[in-house]
Image: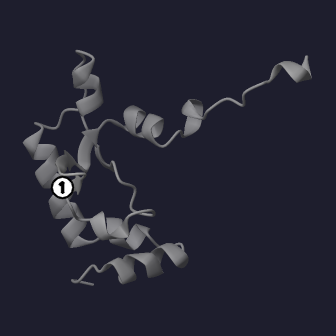
Amino acid sequence: MAEWTKEKIKQLIAEDKLYRFYKSREWKELKEKVLKEFHNECLWCREKGIISKAEEVHHIQYVKKYPELALCEYYDYRGQRYRNLVPLCHDCHDRAHERMKYKKKKQVNEERW
């Protein structure tokens, strides 16, 4: 698949086969470009003064919600340009998606006590 359209990505999402997009040449080339641009360093760790190796590139605007931005480095919102793809280490990527130990804890309201 050389042409990644919004409809094609939506189809992969519906079929639970989005991994095909992430294995595509286009995504791999864009991922490498972003990693190289940031010297293979995790952006979130770097903002905290820590240097760690970025292994993944995170979509700020999630592909499942905004498939048209899947291959976009930037997006525009209310007249401003924002970065859509950021390099993250595995730990920060888990935090971004609230996976593993970063899942939000259920809030307990006072009525339960």
| Residue positioned 22% across, 15% down in the render | 49
The picture places residue 28, in percent across and down from the top left corner, at 22, 62
Q: How many marks?
A: 1
Scheme of colours in the image: one colour
Q: Is residue 49 above or below residue 2?
A: above
The picture places residue 84, in percent across and down from the top left corner, at 25, 51
Left of 7 or right of it: where is 3?
A: left
| Residue positioned 44% across, 62% down in the render | 65
Left of 90 or right of it: where is 17?
A: right
In the rendered image, which residue does mark 1 sit on?
Answer: 73
Residue 40 occupies quadrant: top left
Residue 9 occupies quadrant: bottom left
Residue 54 occupies quadrant: top left
Q: Residue furthest front?
A: 78
Tell me the quadrant of the picture where the C terminus can be found. top right
Tell me, yes or no, if residue 23 can be seen here. no
> Quick one: SS at disc 1?
loop
The picture places residue 5, in percent across and down from the top left corner, at 29, 80
| Residue positioned 15% across, 62% down in the render | 29
